[in-house]
Image (cartoon, helix red, strand yellow):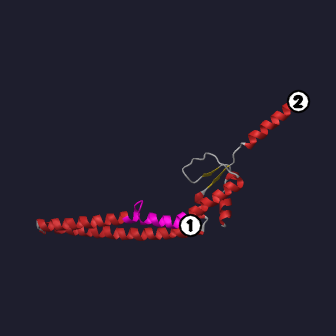
Amino acid sequence: MKKIFTFLILALVLSTSSFAQKFAYVDTDYILNKIPEFKQAQDKLDLLSSKWQEEIEIKYSDIDIMYRTYQKEQLLLTEDMKIKREEAIMAKEKQAKELQKKYFSPSGELSIRRQELVQPIQEKIYDAIQQLASNNKYAVIFDSSSDLIMLYSNPNLDKSDKILEILGY
């Protein structure tokens, strides 16, 4: 009877441990910051962004000058001339807003460039995470840099350095 009871307990312990799932987490921000190509891509994007921002600021500066000149000369202008000046100022402002939208909207140039430069790096990281998960039979791998709230995380479960190793960094 004792042998049967021991056998049942052993079978129960082995069966429950075989259903246990393995978890890990990675910090994609940490991984990205360790990859030189990402830093280069980020520098290119920052350079483009500042160049475009400067271009837009120049347009708004020109609009401001036009408006101040209009205000100074407003008393001397005829109604027809006032309307033409106001229309010119509004047209310039519309152009500046369209340029800003062209560069910085969610579907704008900056977003497109970011996708071209950063997405291939993110895909490499994703492939490395999949490789790590399949090789080590992880059921779930979390990203600690996302909106997922991790109140506690065991540093032994952080596999960010392993991903960098798989990527060759």
Q: Which mark is residue 38?
A: 1
How far is mark 1 from mark 2, CA to CA? 63 Å
Quadrant containing the N terminus is: top right
Q: Are marks 1 and 2 in contact (CB under 8 Å)?
A: no
Q: How far from the left and from the top, in percent, is residue 110? A: 44, 65
| SS under mark 2 | helix
Looking at the magenta stretch, what is its main secondary structure?
Answer: helix
| SS under mark 1 | helix
Q: How far from the left and from the top, in percent, is residue 50? A: 43, 69
Q: Is residue 70 left or right of residue 128?
A: left
Q: How far from the left and from the top, in percent, is residue 94? A: 28, 64
What residue is pinned by disc 2?
Answer: 2
When the figure is inspected, residue 79 is found, relative to residue 145, above or below; the finding is: below
Viewer-proximal residue among 123 and 157: 123
Q: Quadrant of residue 164?
A: bottom right
Q: Nearer the viewer, mark 1 or mark 2?
A: 2
Residue type at mark 2 is Lys
Mark 2 residue crowding within 10 angstroms, few (<14) / some (14–19) / many (20+):
few
Residue type at mark 1 is Phe
Q: Residue furthest top?
A: 1
Q: Which mark is residue 163?
A: none
Q: Is residue 62 left or right of residue 167?
A: left
Q: Quadrant of residue 84?
A: bottom left
Q: How far from the left and from the top, in percent, is residue 122? A: 57, 62
Q: Magenta stretch?
A: 102-119
Q: Is residue 68 left or right of residue 103?
A: left
Marked residue nearer the N-terminal end (1 or 2): 2
Membership of 54 in magenta stretch = no
Viewer-proximal residue among 66 and 99: 99
